[in-house]
Image (spheres, coloured by chain):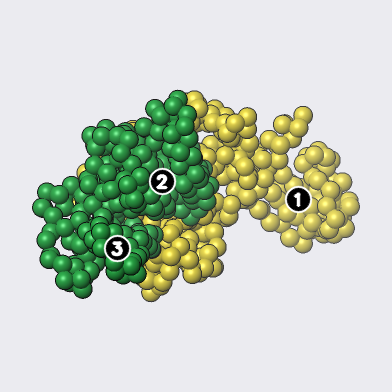
Chain colours: A yellow, B green
Amino acid sequence: MSIDVGALAPSPPDTPAVHVAGVSKSFGTLPALSDVDLRVQRGQVYGVLGPNGAGKTTLLRILLGLVHADTGTVRVSGRHPGAPEALRGIGALIETPAFVPHLSGRTNLRVLARARGLPDSEVQRVLEIVQLDGRADDRYGGYSLGMGQRLGVAAALLGRPPLLVLDEPTNGLDPDGVVQMRELVRNLGTDGTTVLLSSHILGEVQQICERVVVLDRGRTIADDTVENLRAGPGALTVELRADPPAPARTIARSRFGEATVPESDDATLRLHVDPGDVPALVRALVEGGVDVHEVRHERQSLEDVFFELTRHDAAEVRS
Amino acid sequence: MIAALNAETLLLRHRLAPLVVGGSWIALVLAFAFGVPYIVYSTLDPDATADRADLLETLVPAAVDSTSVSSYPMFGGAIMLILGVLVTGPEYRWGTWTARLSQGPGRAQVVLAKIAAGVLAVIAIAVAAAVTSAVASAVIASVEGEPLNWPAPVEMLASLGGAVLISATWMSVGAALGVLFRGTSVALAVGLVWTLGLENAIAGLAGVIGALEPVRAVLLGTASGSLVAGLGAPTQGDGGTPGVVDHLTPAAACAVLAVYLVASTVLAVALVRRRDIT
């Protein structure tokens, strides 16, 4: 009765886990996705980022065959999305998990396991992974948000699928749960599972994902490795605490230009400059009678990149 | 398909709907096919021997095949329609279609498995109702000192088959309505208005407006009633149970029911396959 998911994957090993090309989707007159491309290699942990309404969940639903794309090509492990062979290789948690409220968590999982042709022992295995085995026989309707989320993740793990699609998996989890979930996703990635992770907690994505795609208003505005995105324009900020600050700012602007040294309300200068230029600046400041108390290099986070990207995109749309 | 059916039967086994609907139906059969007629029989003037004999004849084991199935056309149909709505409709309220349709079985397989699980439930309910009817008729026969003469096995099987066909058809129509209206409330309202209002209105008007006769012939209630009449139950016009009519031959009645069963299943599958699950 049990199905070996690995045995269901006769597609060549170099076939990408997810291949999306030129996909567009509208709901009525409302465009949800516009000409989106995405290529996820097997074993990658890939982040899908975007503000609310960016089209992330629509994209994930398209990969599961739950939503039909209007145009474009979608393949999941080389197969049409929604095809039984493709679905058996995907574990998914999309938005808020939903189960039959008056059944226990265990029975809900047993129903899903049966649909995959899996034995009940698999249900116990995933319940232990998400540490819900102690409450598995309680009614799902009585679960807290975090317990429901754990059950949703357990459902996604049924059958050890080679591709995991997780939409906000840490939603509602307590701090311990967030850490456990991060470790779980990281371990899955290490084990060769492909993970497509959508999350609003950008620090989490920065720690877990190798690559990210950033969507805004249904369009791809970035698709690169986390490292490359963080190394982009404005990647490094030099923070320099100087006294008095006004002449320090004047000296810095005379060397690097006004735009590179923005105004600030405190005694700290924040400069978007090459780190190699910093020693010369410090010398110039000291020679100009300014005391330099501290120099720090701050690398921009994925969150900084995200806000920069989506702010620019919003500005372009307005103009 | 087997995996999907395993999942859906497990789900239905753990739900209250089949128990509540099945229990209600068995109680109705006991009450209206045996309980009320027996009370009427018991309170009839002892001198009205012919009336008493006619009534008792329908309550003893020899007539259990036709008596047990006589309530299906009208009341049983409505009850099974409710079961069908409860098989598919709550998935929208719970938001569980996403999980249901992302496990491996295709959309068509999931919907077919749901309806098949519903059919298994109505088979169990029909068997339970038949057994309960047999027990009730045996008790009445024992109390009244009547012989325990049972119908031939083939007649019992035909009665059970008729009950299952009628129940499965109404259940599948209910399942299709649950999908069509994406929930239970509207589907139940439309289904019950159709069953208890529209169909009866058309059937009644067809007696005076000849143009409606072809429409009456293809109504679900007409087909169910005609099949039950073909199984030996007295028609409503002859003092039988409401809904039992003889407008169609048993073969034509079976054909109409089969068309409804297939059409409603195809409709449910087509809707689930075509729509986005958002």
**Residue A130, image x, y percentages:** 40, 65
Residue at mark 2: B174
- Which mark is in front, 2 or 1? 2
Which kind of residue does numbered mark 2 sit on?
Gly
Q: CA distance from mark 1 to mark 3?
A: 108 Å
Q: Is residue A20 visible?
A: no
> What is the three-letter code of the residue carrying label 3?
Ala
Discs 2 and 1 share one subunit: no
Front of the two marks 1 and 3: 3
- Subunit that carries the residue with mark 1: A
Q: Chain of mark 3?
A: B
Quarter of the rendering occupied by the C terminus of chain A: top right
Identity of the residue drawn at 23% across and 61% down: B53
Front residue (pair B247, A146) = B247
> What amino acid is labelled 1 in the image?
Arg
Separation of residues labelled 3 and 2 (CA atoms)? 44 Å
- Residue at position x 59%, y 52% from top? A200
Q: Residues within 10 Å of mark 3 (few under 14, many from 20)?
A: few
Could you tell me which chain the residue with mark 2 belongs to? B
Report which residue position mark 1 lands on.
A270
Q: Dot 1 surroundings within 10 Å: few (below 14), some, or many (20 or more)?
A: many
Q: Secondary structure at mark 1?
A: strand
